[in-house]
Amino acid sequence: MELGHVAKFLQGKTILVTGATGFLAKVFIEEILRHQPNVNKLYLLMRAPDEKAATQRLNVEVISTKLFRVLRENWGSGFDPFISSKLIAVAGDTSSENLGIKDSILREEMWKEIDIIVNVAATTNFSERYDVALGINTFGAFNLLNFGKKCDKIKLFLHVSTAYVCGEQTGMIFEKSFYMSDTLRKTNNLNILDEKTLVEEKLDKLRHQCISDEAITTTMRELGLKRAKLNGWPNTYVFTKAMGEMLLGNFKGDIPLVIIRPTIISSTYKHPFPGWIESIRTMDTIIVKYGMGALTTFLASPSSTCDVTPVDMVVNAMIVAMEAHYANHQYSCETIYHVSSSFRNPMKYSDLVKFMHCYFTKNPCTDRNGQRVKVNKLKVFDKADRFFLYMQLKYVLPLKVLYFMNILSCHLFNNVYTKLDRKVKSIIRLAKFYKPYVFFAGIFDDTNLDTLQRFAEERGVDVAEFNFDSKSIDWEDYFMNTHISGLLKHGVRS
Ligand SMILES: NC(=O)c1ccc[n+]([C@@H]2O[C@H](COP(=O)([O-])OP(=O)(O)OC[C@H]3O[C@@H](n4cnc5c(N)ncnc54)[C@H](OP(=O)(O)O)[C@@H]3O)[C@@H](O)[C@H]2O)c1
């Protein structure tokens, strides 16, 4: 059988991948192995004290997941030898120089063999400590680039960022690169090295004060948020990811750089099977809490676009971009791709609310006592004060009336009131946390991605197999028949 275009390209390649224990990179690895068993090898950089521990993580956290079921079935008893001949677990840490790879022979080998670097590793915690986020999302990317510069044959550096590096911009958002001192506030000038110095000095000072680790964490978290806000980003995560892009763009030298900026990544659309996801993230928290009956009202803008992309489509875009840019590696440019849906096939939060209601009405969850959880349509408010007023009128006022009529004792009143207050505050906290998503008023232009698609078609890539066209998704069908059930099956349990 004649090999497909992408399989031909992958044949014999050596790729360094970071973030393998995470959600996206796992799908990337599985897909590469499924399409081209004759890839030379994938070096997988993982945080671990040594190679043995890294291999253990590879086996337990990557290969044993259900995601690899299809590959396992295809290979039967040959699966384990196949995996160990192709996947090399490397103990390291992107936030360290030379990626913290201690074994110098291994390092030399990697420098000789690597053709492509794919950087997926990140801390995705929105409110991460500033030192940690800067170390991974900003300087981790930079360390990896420097590692790449030592690779004799490197032809491409593919970096996974996020579409939300744009902050809270509105209107059309283009696939534009950052410049070094860019900020989202016109009044400021950002100096990434100054940010590093600031963090180091702050940490030094805190350590000299002999305060608890917990207090240091809180202070460093607050510092990240403060610096992010000062420069116009809503949280530490997207701020440090944006700075990572800046360093890569500025220091890439003659290495071709591709930056993939996905929006919210959801469960697999088709491959290796529909609905696989790992853990509960972003809008999925809302879906799961709603289905379990723990969320009846929420703060969001129903007319905002909920920009979702299934994970296998993100991976398809990564692989097709790799193939296209590898073929043109003589042009050492930087190309950004929004892997998004808001421009070509938008889904609103009001649609999501409708799908959730339909799904859980047809397929109710069961509570701890084995009872079916009945859901009403989620009440969505787009203003915090209205939400607050609603909660007061619906719950607090009747409570007060019962109390003044002496139907409720003071003790019971205080008890219920405290619980209610906690619930309101937790919903507001959740809404604030997801504000960059649930109130997002931008549309991601994806002209570059569209061009990539047409370019791939012209050159004979099987674009049905490597589909990343958001127009092909029927959102209602995907949420009703794939995503929510996949989330409950794989995400909640993993
Ligand atoms: N998920 C989304 O909705 C989404 C949306 C847009 C963009 N993205 C981007 O897509 C990428 C992957 O996201 P994800 O959802 O797969 O994240 P994830 O599940 O949280 O995985 C992150 C991975 O990075 C690794 N990592 C973190 N710090 C590291 C370090 N210092 N050295 C080596 N490895 C390190 C983690 O390893 P450990 O297991 O050791 O922690 C983990 O394997 C990220 O770059 C993220 O910014 C994600």
Image (cartoon, rainbow, N blue to C red):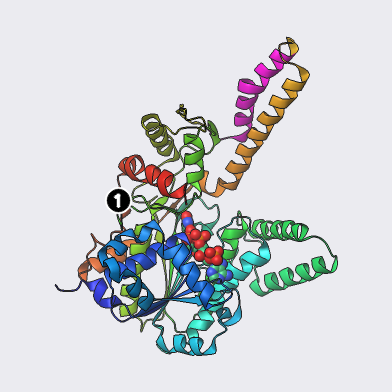
Instruction: Tell me the chief SS of the magenta region.
Output: helix
Say if 437 sits above or below 119 in the image.
above
Circle 1 — which element? helix
Of residues 472 and 271, the one nearer the viewer is 271
- The crowding category of the residue bearing disc 1, from other C-alpha atoms within 10 Å (few below 14, some 14 to 19, many at least 20), is few
For this rendering, which residue is in front, 418 or 182?
Answer: 418
Q: Residue at x 48, y 31 (%)?
A: 378
Residue 416 vs residue 238: left or right? right
Q: Position of residue 181 (x, y in %)?
A: 61, 70
Can residue 165 be found in the magenta stretch? no
Residue at image mark 1: 471
Of all residues, the one furthest to the right in this rendering is 209
How many labels, in total? Answer: 1
Residue furthest out toward the left: 1
Is 97 rendered above or below residue 343? below
136 left or right, relative to 265: right
What residue lies at 75% left-to-right and 57% top-to-bottom? Answer: 214
Residue reaching furthest to the top: 405
- Residue 255 lies, in percent from the top left, at 44, 82
- Is residue 200 or residue 423 the one in the foreground? 423
Q: Is 370 situated left or right of 217 in this image? A: left
The residue under label 1 is which amino acid type? Answer: Lys
Can I make out residue 180 in this image?
Answer: no
**Boundaries of the magenta span:** 380-403
Is residue 63 visible in the rendered image? The answer is yes
Q: Residue at x 52, y 82 (%)?
A: 147
Instruction: Report the front residue among 307 and 87.
Output: 87
Q: Where's residue 274, x and y in %?
A: 32, 51
Quarter of the figure that contains the N terminus: bottom left
Which residue is at a point 58% across and 79% down the rendered structure image? 100
Q: Is residue 397 magenta?
A: yes
